[in-house]
Image (tube, rainbow, N blue to C red):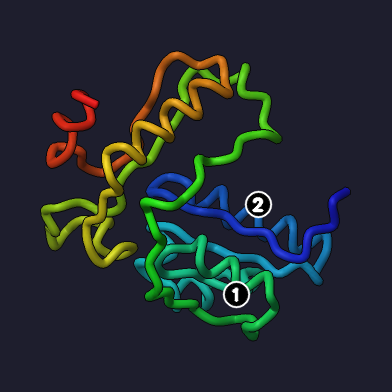
Amino acid sequence: AARPRLVGAVTHITSLGFAAFLLREIKRLDPSIRTVLSGYQATVSGEAALERLPWVDFVVAGEHEIAYRDLLAGNLAPRQVVRVTERLPLDSLPPADYANLDMTRYQWMSVRASLNCPYGCAFCQENAVWDRFRVPAIEHIVDEIEAQLGRHPQRHVDFIDAEMTTYAEPLARA
């Protein structure tokens, strides 16, 4: 009903198949919609994803939030891997907006504080998406948690960070 121009799916380890299915069905319903695949699985093999999934117009490697700005502006030709090198300003990002979701149906409030992992293991998928470990100021993380808990009924926060050991203690104190 909304008639979007662009639809994207962010993949994690287990969601690539579902994301590919969803984007294929969207493209089948309206071939004019541009489809975007991003996240771990898409990033690790972007060219292969484009080759195997002809209904996907773009694969985003890197911080996909930035790529959407350019994709929505219509500045990119389809059927390409978009490699993002610009970095999100973590200390100035607003809290996630869940206004269109019925949050009473969720038990946990998810918060992501950092990007990547400080250890850089060769076998880990985190390094395929983000080039270095980044954490915003502890006060920014606390503000995000307080904003989300103030807006929604959940009393449990689930951190979806890859690794928190380098800032867990100062975050707990704050």
Q: Is residue 96 left or right of residue 168?
A: right
Picture coordinates of residue 96, whole percent (x, y): 53, 41
> Gap in Å between the C-alphas at discs 1 and 2?
22 Å
Amino acid carrying mark 2 in the image: Leu
Q: Is residue 30 left or right of residue 122?
A: right
Q: Is residue 54 left or right of residue 133?
A: right
Q: Nearer the viewer, residue 159 or 137?
A: 137
Q: Secondary structure at mark 2?
A: helix
Q: Is residue 114 left or right of residue 88?
A: left
Q: Nearer the viewer, residue 73 or 45?
A: 73
Amino acid carrying mark 1 in the image: Asp
Q: Which residue is mark 2?
A: 22
Residue 170: which disc? none
Residue plotted at (35% across, 31% down): 142
Decide: is 35 above or below 145: below
Picture coordinates of residue 166, whole percent (x, y): 13, 41
Q: Quadrant of the C terminus?
A: top left
Q: Residue furthest right?
A: 1
Question: Are circles 1 and 2 on residues that touch, CB within 8 Å?
Answer: no
Quarter of the rendering containing residue 173: top left
Picture coordinates of residue 114, whole percent (x, y): 30, 47
Q: Nearer the viewer, residue 45 or 106?
A: 106
Residue plotted at (14% across, 59% down): 120
**Comparing labels 1 and 2, the label whose residue is closer to the camera:** 1
Sequence-wise, the earlier of marks 1 and 2 is 2
Q: Secondary structure at mark 1?
A: helix
Residue count near mark 2 (Cα–Cα under 10 Å), binned few <14, some 14–19, many ≥20: some
Picture coordinates of residue 71, whole percent (x, y): 63, 73
Q: Which residue is mark 1?
A: 70
Decide: is 161 above or below 126: above
